[in-house]
Amino acid sequence: MNRAIILIALGVLLISTLIAVVSCSTSSQPSSTAPNTDTQTKPPPGGTPGNDFTPGANIAVIIEGLAFSPSTITVDAGTTVTWTNQDTVNHTVTSRMGIFDSGIMSRGSSFSRTFTNFGDFEYYCTLHPNMVGHVIVK
């Protein structure tokens, strides 16, 4: 009797794990590579750590190991940021303010956005909400 209960519990655990893995690695939407432009006008907060980049530059953010790298960047208006998924699972790049959303990005997919207004644009992965990043436009 105990053995049967243990086997049933292990079977349920195995099936649940397989469903979770498949849902994190299945992509039904193509990723967008066309640059978007922002509309947020909130001024950036002072003293926020990040990397400074040249105006009008193209900045790359890599998605790998369930993280955005770099996670915080400081750029001038007119800078295009391109996120590329180099991870083994799907991700999104989604604005907390609803300003932009990459859709589901499979490995090798990229999403670009040109930031024209000042502000602190926080974004995250909807599939892994602990993955958070910031684009600070000064």
Image (tube, helix red, strand yellow):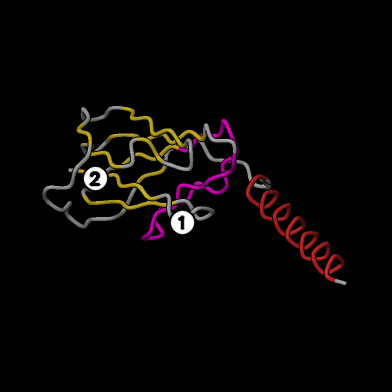
Q: Residue at x 50, y 46 (%)?
A: 102
Q: Nearer the viewer, residue 86 or 66?
A: 66
Which mark identifies residue 75? none
The magenta span reads: 89-111
Q: Measured along the vertical axis of the image, is residue 12 above or below residue 31?
A: below
Q: Earlier in the sequence, mark 1 or mark 2?
A: 1
Which mark identifies residue 129? 1
Amino acid on which disc 1 is placed = Pro
Image quadrant in which the N terminus is located: bottom right
Task: Give the total of numbered labels.
Answer: 2
**Magenta includes 128?**
no
Amino acid on which disc 2 is placed = Ile
Q: Residue at x 34, y 34 (%)?
A: 80
To which residue does mark 2 refer?
A: 136
Q: Position of residue 93 (x, y in %)?
A: 45, 47
Could you say which quadrant of the image residue 61 lies in? Answer: top left
Q: Residue at x 63, y 49 (%)?
A: 24
Could you say which quadrant of the image residue 73 lies in? Answer: top left
